[in-house]
Image (tube, grey):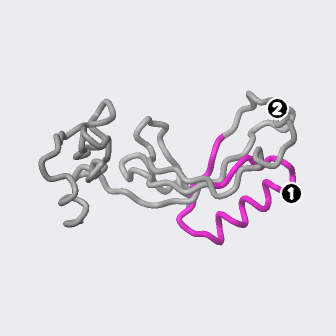
Amino acid sequence: MYNKLKEHLGHNIECASYGKDLENISIECTDCNEVLVSHDKEPEDNEEIKMMIAVEYYTDETKKENEHANATFEIFDNVEKAHAFAREKYKINMLESVWTADFNMKYIFIEDEAWNYDDNADLYSNKIIIYNLNAFKKC
């Protein structure tokens, strides 16, 4: 880091923010158009985050071929349970995707021995798709 910053001595440096809620703040060299340091906003102290696995699937078999089909997802904190659920949805041709994300614990809870969630714009962040069936469909 020292050598990287040393290269910009005497350059014009600025602090920039990105996102409507300041999700990211970066230190940038405007002479070189280079980001020197960049950090995403940390979760608020009262927000607990839990990495979960989501299995997204179609809710109506007649709509699975429609690009506007209704889909929902179940969340799991256990890879084996997520894999078993995804395998069952795949067998009946209802699987859409499997992904991980950081879920906000304010909006997820256990109900009837399964994870459930309240729909909310802040429900999850950092979504990473592991498997997407659409990637293998022909146009």
Q: Which mark is residue 30?
A: none
* Residue at the spot 81% in from the left edge and 30% down from the top edge: 66
The C terminus: image quadrant: top right
Return the x and y of residue 25 as percentages of the image width and height. 25, 44
Return the x and y of residue 113 as percentages of the image width and height. 56, 61
Q: Is 88 drawn above or below residue 124 in the view shown?
A: below
Please state which of residues 5 and 138 is positioned toward the viewer in this rendering.
5
Mark 1 vs mark 2, CA separation in Å: 17 Å
Q: Which residue is mark 2?
A: 63
* Residue at the spot 55% in from the left edge and 53% down from the top edge: 128
Dot placed on the residue nearer the N-terminal end, 1 or 2: 2
Type of amino acid under label 2: Lys
In magenta stretch: residue 33: no
Does 54 sit left or right of 126 as displayed?
Answer: right
Quadrant of the rendered image containing residue 54: bottom right
* Residue at the spot 22% in from the left edge and 46% down from the top edge: 27
Please state which of residues 67 and 82 is positioned toward the viewer in this rendering.
67
Does 52 sit left or right of 71 as displayed?
Answer: left
Q: Outermost residue, left direction?
A: 10
Q: Which residue is mark 1?
A: 91
* Number of marks drawn: 2
Quadrant of the rendered image containing residue 14: top left
Q: Is 47 drawn above or below residue 85 in the view shown?
A: above
The N terminus: image quadrant: bottom left
Q: Which residues are magenta?
A: 72-98
Please state which of residues 119 and 31 is positioned toward the viewer in this rendering.
31
> Under tag 2, what secondary structure?
helix
